[in-house]
Image (tube, helix red, strand yellow):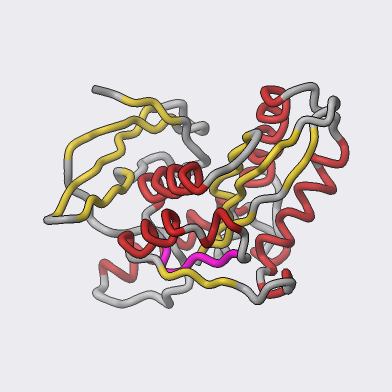
Amino acid sequence: MWSYDLPEDRTARGGRLRLLTVVDEYSRQCLAIEVERSCRAAQVVETLKWLALTWGMPEYLRSDNGPQFIAREVCGWLGQAGCETILITPGSPWENPYIESFIGKLRDECLNREIFADLQEARAVIEGWWEEYNTRRPHSSLGYLTPVEFARQARSGQEDMAGRGSVGSGRATLSLRPLRGCVRSLILCYNCGGWLAAATFTTHDTTSMHAERNDCPERVGARRQSVS
């Protein structure tokens, strides 16, 4: 299960910043922080498409009732992707505890300590904090592993159970589905610096997108680069 939210911040001159933030509730890993001046439903869909390419889709996605999250475009795409939405009760952020906890850390450790001159600086600083959170900061709830280390162990355990013909607990959202299709884009791994292929394939009336299995043990994150 993933959860996402859209917190706000300001630049030094008062310019608005919207941070589309997506967290894997099982591993506590932050999958994305997209920093923009504004965020429309189409941008939410594009971010989710990229995460589907990289990680595979979760079974459930939890959010509040913000207009970007309940938009017809977003709900329609999630339905086609096979992901069910869980909308919390309006005015009840405690029903979305994982993303609220993460955003609290983001504010305390980054947003409230920085004065951003512009959008570009905000992106650079927040990206640096995001990488540190995922790869260098141990979490007591994860047995004092980082989110990336915990996710790697969970993925290895799922693969071992799949090899024995067993079914996992279903708590993790890490994708183990076989992949087919033509290469459409590349993923740059922050850990090893290598380019990894992402595939898309079409079946009848739907198009599915997944990332090719990543041989790098860290799989911290990726930058997008299109290829012909």
Picture mark count:
0
Residue situated in front as seen by the camera: 217 or 69: 69
113 left or right of 184 in image = right
Residue 76 coordinates in the image, percent (x, y): 37, 60
Compared to 200, does 63 lie above or below?
below
Residue sticking out furthest to the left: 204
**Camera sees residue 76:** yes
- Name the residue: 41% across, 39% down: 216
Residue 202 coordinates in the image, percent (x, y): 17, 49
**Camera sees residue 156:** no
- Name the residue: 39% across, 33% down: 187
Magenta-colored span? 58-63
168 left or right of 117 in image = left
Q: Is residue 62 magenta?
A: yes
Q: Does the magenta stretch include residue 24?
A: no
The overriding secondary structure of the stretch rendered in magenta is strand
- Name the residue: 66% across, 43% down: 19
Residue 133 coordinates in the image, percent (x, y): 68, 45
Picture quarter with the C terminus? top left
Residue situated in front as seen by the camera: 20 or 13: 13
Residue situated in front as seen by the camera: 18 or 217: 18
Q: In which quarter of the image is residue 139?
A: bottom right
Q: Quadrant of residue 94?
A: bottom right
Residue 60 coordinates in the image, percent (x, y): 46, 69
- Name the residue: 12% across, 56% down: 204
